[in-house]
Image (cartoon, grey):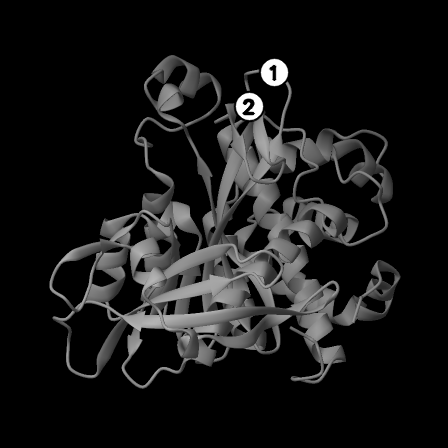
Amino acid sequence: MDVGLAQVQGWSVELEALCERIAPRFGRVEVRRRAGAFLGGLLAGVERKNGWQLAEHAGEDTPDGMQRLLNHARWDPEEVRDDLRGYVVEHLGDPQAVLVVDETGFLKKGSKSAGVQRQYSGTAGRIENCQLGVFLAYAGPSGHALIDRELYLPEGWTADRQRCRVAGIPEQVEFHTKPQLARVMLERALDAGVPCGWVTADEVYGGDGRLRRWLEERDVPHVLAVKRSQALWSLRLRQERAANLAGQLPARAWRQLSAGDGAKGPRVYAWARVAIRPLREPGRGHWLLVRRRLADGELAYYVCYGPARTTLAELVRVAGTRWMVESGFQAGKGQTGLDHYQVRRYPAWYRHVTLAMVALAFLAVMRARAVPVGAGGG
């Protein structure tokens, strides 16, 4: 179901309740009201959700108030992030939900926005001048939403403390790889008791052995994409490349399964798995999951860990949830202004993006209420 933004007018009671939920995070009444107006603008049919157009939608003559909300007003976006996470869990929570780590690029001009540099952006599919945000999404049977975010700061930034000070980056913020940022967000969610059954992410994160080991230590089942060259311990007690292990699979091992619905219907691929890691905890299994595209035979690889009874279909379901998050990024940028900000400083990025995530979660919850579970609402 495609939820039109005009329907938001019929959700005024629910939106007011959400605003009341986060209101204590904004100390002054003026700031609370402006935050509510900011959210209302993000959910309205405003073409560009920047300071000028959000102010105009709120009936203000200048963007000064909206800019103060993002740059100078006293409120902590980390507290609002916690409220957002609680809201999503309350309405979309499920014990078999999947935590999905993914990143998206924000194209920028100039060199002053925190973290900006020429770097590869999956959003653009090429190297661009951009910022990169690493996000944690929550995907359950009723719907999906972004629940956490971290701005990636390249080493060239964190090594230049003067440049960091100008961009508002605190002295204590050091360089972290993308997998390290993922672990920070996953740890927050797990420590907060977010109900989930699995974690999934792409090769950037699956290729990091420290992240995989940390998830195993916490006994968190996962399906993490890896490169074809990834070395894995086979049952022959030696390390073998993922591509070599896949090449040994017999024809009978492959099954055609859908990894979820896409824009053109079910995403059907051929899938197979092979057990790896001869030394394992009782009741736990380790597998290499392989996906083969039907059109041209292209292969993709995933390292998996979970209960020994886990079926192939379940691993495929988890692997397919990452596409939900890609559609979530598109919705966030297209509907709630996730990338419409005109701020350069580090704290302001977190403030805008967090409020855009709150608006996006609101749409996800309203969609879940409108569509019964199992009828395409995910």
Q: Is 298 placed above or below 281 here?
A: above
Q: Residue placed at 55% from the left, 23% from the top?
A: 113
Front residue (pair 250, 95): 250
Q: Residue placed at 22% from the left, 55% from the top?
A: 240
Q: Amino acid under label 1?
A: Gly
Horizontal arrangement in the rendering, residue 222 relative to residue 2 (left or right)? left
Please give the count of numbered marks on the rendered protein.
Answer: 2
Q: In x, y percent, where is residue 344? A: 58, 25
Residue under label 1: 110
Q: Quadrant of the C terminus?
A: bottom right
Q: In x, y percent, where is residue 51? A: 74, 33
Q: Quadrant of the N terminus?
A: bottom right
Q: Are marks 2 and 1 in contact (CB under 8 Å)?
A: yes
Q: In x, y percent, where is residue 165? A: 41, 19
The reply to whether residue 120 is in sight is yes
Horizontal arrangement in the rendering, residue 58 relative to residue 234 (left or right)? right
Question: In the current view of this chain or complex, which residue is farthest to the front?
Answer: 251
Q: Residue placed at 53% from the left, 58% from the top?
A: 297
The reply to whether residue 76 is in sight is no
Dot 2 falls on a residue whose secondary structure is: loop
Q: Is 138 placed above or below 347 here?
A: below
- Numbered tag placed on residue 113 in the rendering: 2
- For label 2, the crowd category at 10 Å Cα-Cα, with few meaning under 14, some 14 to 19 and many 20 or more, is many
Horizontal arrangement in the rendering, residue 316 relative to residue 334 (left or right)? left
- The answer to which image quadrant residue 275 occupies is bottom left
Front residue (pair 365, 376): 376
Q: Is 234 placed above or below 254 here?
A: above
Dot 1 falls on a residue whose secondary structure is: loop
Front residue (pair 303, 103): 303
